[in-house]
């Protein structure tokens, strides 16, 4: 008979906060992971833009050399 109240008190003061804080921890962890992936995406987009600019520079140099060769 005394086991039921002890179990109820432990559930209220130990199990419930543990469950709530574990959910909060996992939500924060997932939010940080999403932010990390967004930043990685931005970095990759900037690297793509960098490569596009590099290709444009190479094309301009190629045109310049073509003009020099044809002259």
Image: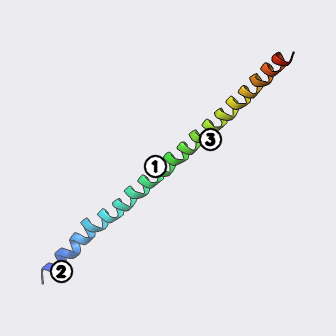
Q: Whole-Å distance between the Cαs marked 2 and 1?
A: 40 Å
**Dot 1 alpha-carbon crowd within 10 angstroms: few under 14, some 14 to 19, many 20 or more:** few
Q: Nearer the viewer, mark 1 or mark 3?
A: 3
Give the position of the N terminus as an image quadrant: bottom left
User: Do residues under tags 2 and 1 come within 8 Å of each other at their CB atoms?
Assistant: no
In percent of width and height, residue 3 lies at: 14, 79
Residue at image location 57% in from the left, 39% down from the top:
43
User: Do residues under tags 2 and 3 come within 8 Å of each other at their CB atoms?
Assistant: no
**Dot 2 alpha-carbon crowd within 10 angstroms: few under 14, some 14 to 19, many 20 or more:** few
Relative horizontal placement of residue 4, taking residue 25 as reference (left or right): left
Q: Find disc 2 in the rendering and name its residue.
A: 4
> Of callouts 2 and 3, which one flags the residue occurring earlier in the amino acid sequence?
2
Q: Find disc 3 in the rendering and name its residue.
A: 45
Image quarter for residue 48? top right
In percent of width and height, residue 69 lies at: 81, 17
Residue at image location 69% in from the left, 35% down from the top:
52
The residue lying furthest to the front in this view is 70
> Of callouts 1 and 3, which one flags the residue occurring earlier in the amino acid sequence?
1
Residue at image location 29% in from the left, 63% down from the top:
18
Q: Whole-Å distance between the Cαs marked 1 and 3?
A: 20 Å
**Dot 3 alpha-carbon crowd within 10 angstroms: few under 14, some 14 to 19, many 20 or more:** few
Q: Whole-Å distance between the Cαs marked 2 and 3?
A: 59 Å
Relative horizontal placement of residue 67, taking residue 21 as reference (left or right): right
Q: Nearer the viewer, mark 2 or mark 3?
A: 3
Relative horizontal placement of residue 52, taking residue 5 as reference (left or right): right
Q: Find disc 1 in the rendering and name its residue.
A: 32
Give the position of the C terminus as an image quadrant: top right
In percent of width and height, residue 32 lies at: 46, 49
Q: Secondary structure at mark 2?
A: helix
The residue lying furthest to the left in this view is 2
> Of callouts 2 and 1, which one flags the residue occurring earlier in the amino acid sequence?
2
In percent of width and height, residue 39 lies at: 54, 43
């Amino acid at each position: 008979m005394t086991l039921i109240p002890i179990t109820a008190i432990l559930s209220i003061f130990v199990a419930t906060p543990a469950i709530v804080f574990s959910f909060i921890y996992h939500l924060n962890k997932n939010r940080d992971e999403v932010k990390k992936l967004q930043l990685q995406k931005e970095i990759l987009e900037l690297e793509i833009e960098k490569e596009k600019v590099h290709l444009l520079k190479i094309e301009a140099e190629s045109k310049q050399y073509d003009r020099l060769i044809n002259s």
